[in-house]
Every structure is written in C-alpha cells, then in structure tokens.
C-alpha cells in the first residue's frame, strides 16, 4: 500500500519560510516522479512544482519561480518543497503526488498517488 505523508506546514508571516517534506512508502520512490500541488478554499487544485525521479529536471509554476525549490533524497524516500518569501496568496493545503515514471507532468490526473496534505497559512 502506497503512503505519502506530508509534514512541515504551519502558520508563518509574510516574507517567511517553510520547508515541506513528503515521506513515501510502498512504492519504488527512485523510479517515481514527484510533485507538489496546492488547493485553497474555493479554488481548483493548482500545480506548484515537480521533479523527475533522478532529480535532474524540475518544473515550477510561474507564481513560485525564484521563491520555491523542489528537491528529493532518494535514500530517504522523501521529497521536499522549500518555500521562501511566502505571500498570503500562498495560503493553501499542500499535497505531494507520485507517478511511477521519469518525467514531470503538470496535470493532477497524471499522478497515481496522493498524500493527505498539510496546511500552510501565511499571515499579512
């Protein structure tokens, strides 16, 4: 059974930083592309960032480029999202997702496995 467990969310002031982690179990993590999505109340789920299974290619949505960094540690079966210069509009539930393939995708339907999510709240 595949499990993706996010952690690291919380309340932070605008301009602050958080690092999210997503620990994976039950899948061949080193052969899975990983992604982060977020969903704010009243909004559709939004692609944030993705990384290939070997970490060589990363993709970001425009609104987080230069502020967020996705990375992974295949020895720890964990993917990270470092979030800097946070803004109130970054407030959302952040979820990680996995697909057993090399390449990154922005469509949520391309991902087979999902975590429960972690709340990030940025105060102004």
Image (cartoon, rainbow, N blue to C red):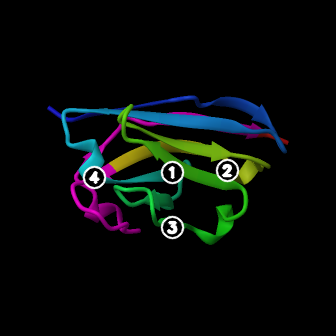
Left or right: residue 53 versus residue 41 is: left
Q: Nearer the viewer, residue 124 or 69?
A: 69
Say which of marks 3 and 2 sits in front: 3
Kindly check if marks 1 and 2 are in contact, taking CB atoms under 8 A apart as contact: yes
Reading the image, the residue beneath label 3 is 59
Q: Nearer the viewer, residue 40 or 108?
A: 108
Q: Residues within 10 Å of mark 4 (few under 14, many from 20)?
A: many
Q: Secondary structure at mark 3?
A: strand
Please give the label number shown on residue 32. 4
Q: Residues within 10 Å of mark 1 (few under 14, many from 20)?
A: many
Left or right: residue 90 versus residue 25 is: right
Give percent across and percent down for residue 20: 56, 36
Reading the image, the residue beneath label 1 is 38
Left or right: residue 23 versus residue 93 is: left
Left or right: residue 60 versus residue 95 is: right
106 within the magenta span? yes
* Residue 44 can be seen in this image: no
Say which of marks 1 and 4 sits in front: 4
Q: In percent of the image, x 28 and y 57: which residue is there? A: 111
Reading the image, the residue beneath label 2 is 90
Where's the N terminus, which quadrant? Answer: top left
Residues drawn in magenta: 98-122
75 within the magenta span? no
């Amino acid at each position: 059974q595949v499990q993706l467990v996010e952690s690291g969310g919380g309340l932070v002031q605008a301009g602050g930083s958080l690092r999210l982690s997503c620990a994976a179990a039950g899948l061949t993590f080193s052969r899975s592309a990983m992604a982060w999505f977020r969903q704010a109340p009243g909004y559709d789920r939004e692609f944030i960032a993705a990384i290939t299974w070997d970490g060589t290619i990363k993709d970001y949505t425009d609104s987080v480029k230069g502020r967020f960094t996705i990375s992974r540690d295949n020895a720890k079966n964990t993917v990270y999202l470092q979030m800097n210069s946070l803004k109130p509009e970054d407030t959302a539930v952040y979820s990680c997702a996995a697909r057993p393939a090399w390449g990154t995708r922005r469509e949520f339907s391309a991902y087979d496995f999902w975590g429960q999510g972690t709340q990030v709240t940025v105060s102004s």
